[in-house]
Image: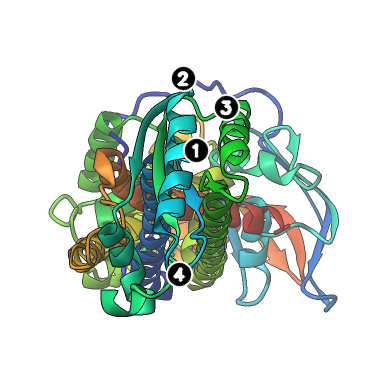
Amino acid sequence: MQISKSSESTDQTSALELDNVSLSYDGGPNVLTNLNLSLPSGSFHFLTGASGAGKTSLLKLLYLAQRPTQGSVRLFGTNVTAAARSALPAIRRKVGVVFQDFRLLDHLSAFDNVALPLRVANAPEPEIKSNVSELLSWVGLDEYMDAKPETLSGGQKQRVAIARAVVNRPRLILADEPTGNVDDTIAMRLMQLFMEMNKLGSNVIIATHNEHLVAKFGFNRLALENHRLSELPPLAANGAQA
Amino acid sequence: MISLRTDLPLGGDSASRFIPWLMAIMVFLGILSVSGVAVFDTILSGWSRAVTGTLTVQIPALSAINEDSANQARTDRAVAALESLPSVRSVKVLKNTEIEALLAPWLGDAAAIGDLPIPVLIDVSLSDESTAIIEGLRTAVTTVVPDAIIDDHRRWFEHLIDLTEGFRLLTIGIALIVTTALALTVVYATRASMAEFREVISVLHLIGARDIYVATQFAKRTLSAALKGSAGGLLAGVFTQIAIGLLASNVESGFLPDIDLGFGFWISLPLVSLAAAVLAMITAYITVLSTLRSMV
């Protein structure tokens, strides 16, 4: 797939910074405690951790569905923790998210679901048609453009969700178990898509339990354990740390 | 052309089912209100035209019997006084049969009326009905017939104007109540709809939609539902209007002036319908914006 480079250049500031970030829900115990992290532009990481370790909560902080109870989150140089509500849409447009439960809109076709990020950004319809069609072909769904999500399999829905996340060439792609429902061939193809986006300047964070995937692609890891975050080197193909 | 394409599901939720019916009823009531104002205005102007430039001089009868010559002399003096005035265009003494016809609905047949001291009525047509002219006429007539009564219809007509104004204000009040009820119901329906589409709104926000985008989606959706309903209300209103017109045409002529509401009135009916739909759309837009802005 030919994806032209975004006119928005990637600057040298950190794409993502967490400074002493903690999160708890409704005054309960911390699900994330004192996270500190700085990711340079163009990075690619796997986010690993046991179930309940807080991977989804961390992703929620990064796609601005949640504000931290302590500390600050900076995205592309902007402190989003302190940002006004009206400033958030512009930042969210730079973040593409693949939700674990897909969160596709059931009344819209696959095409219209993928087109949503472009439509909310007021992109012209010819551009939407061209980009969305090309992307759906790339993920192998060119025959399902008019299909409603309820008629698609889990793997097909996941591919639609991924296409929606990357269609507007975001600067940060967050994916929660993006290969969980697809076979190996499709999983490899989707990983290729993420890597292609990364080459074009997008930061990518993929939350996964799939150690085989983590080992095969050898990217740095962000590990959540006991509500704390650590950055680890790539996992070697035999499971040992590289 | 404005596209009514929306990212929200059309139909199936409470607002989609409810708003067309609400709009149909509100537009129907709105059309009745507009019709009421138009009819009152038309009747008033018809009566106004009928009495403008005229007055009635009443010469009371001296006695029920044996005073015919004296009564005739008083009438002749009044007529002469009236005809001498330059502002008087014409003078017409009503015949007894005409007076008896006027009194018949209240006093019975002519035989019974014949024994009563019936006053002489003189219809006067004026070229100028200013207060000074009428006062001059009153002086001229009462000089020759001191107990003559000059009725320029103003008192009667002022009461009629008051009554019609009252009806008109009542109708405008009803229209305002209908409008307020429409707006409040759309607010309620929109909030219910937002609760139903919480997940859709959440997804739209997370992919970068501004509040204005979400509000526009709801506004388009409301406009689409409202236009369907208001078209139904318009049709019902027009048919009702035609039916009332047919019934009114059966009323004995002379009691009501001819009521021709005119082209402007019929053009205003679709405008009422359209205005109601636009009001619903704007209300939905503002409701969504204010609800979203109150969120953190």
The spot of residue A13 in percent (x, y) is: 71, 27
Circle 1 is placed at which residue position? A170
Q: Is residue B40 above or below residue A104?
A: above
Separation of marks 2 and 3 at Cα, in angstroms: 10 Å
From the viewer's side, name the closer residue of B145 and B57: B145
The answer to whether marks 4 and 1 sit on the same chain is: no
Q: Amino acid at mark 4?
A: Ala
Q: Which residue is mark 4?
A: B64
Circle 2 — which element? loop
Task: Name the residue tied to disc 3.
Answer: B133
Image point 33% across, 29% down: which residue?
A: A124
Q: Identify residue type, mark 2.
A: Pro
The residue lying at 52 percent from left, 46 percent from top is B209
Marks 3/4: CA–CA distance: 33 Å
Asked if the residue at tag 1 contacts the one at tag 4, i.e. Cβ–Cβ closer than 8 Å, the answer is: no
Question: Where on the picture, by quarter, is residue A235?
Answer: bottom right
Q: Chain of mark 4?
A: B
Q: Mark 3 or mark 4: name the one nearer the start of the chain.
A: 4
The image quarter in which residue A83 lies: top right
Q: Tell me, yes or no, whether dots 2 and 3 are on the same chain.
A: yes
**A36 sits left or right of A104 in the view:** right
- Left or right, residue B114 beside residue B189: left
Q: Quadrant of the N terminus of chain B?
A: top left
Q: Quadrant of the C terminus of chain B?
A: bottom right
User: In the visual, does A131 lie left or right of B53?
Assistant: left
Cα–Cα span, label 2 and label 4 = 34 Å
Tag 2 residue: B86
Task: Find numbered disc 4 in the image and state the secondary structure of the residue it sits on.
Answer: loop
Which badge, 2 or 3, comes first in the chain's sequence? 2
- In the image, A70 versus B163, the foreground residue is B163
Instruction: Provide the chain ID for the residue under circle 1.
Output: A
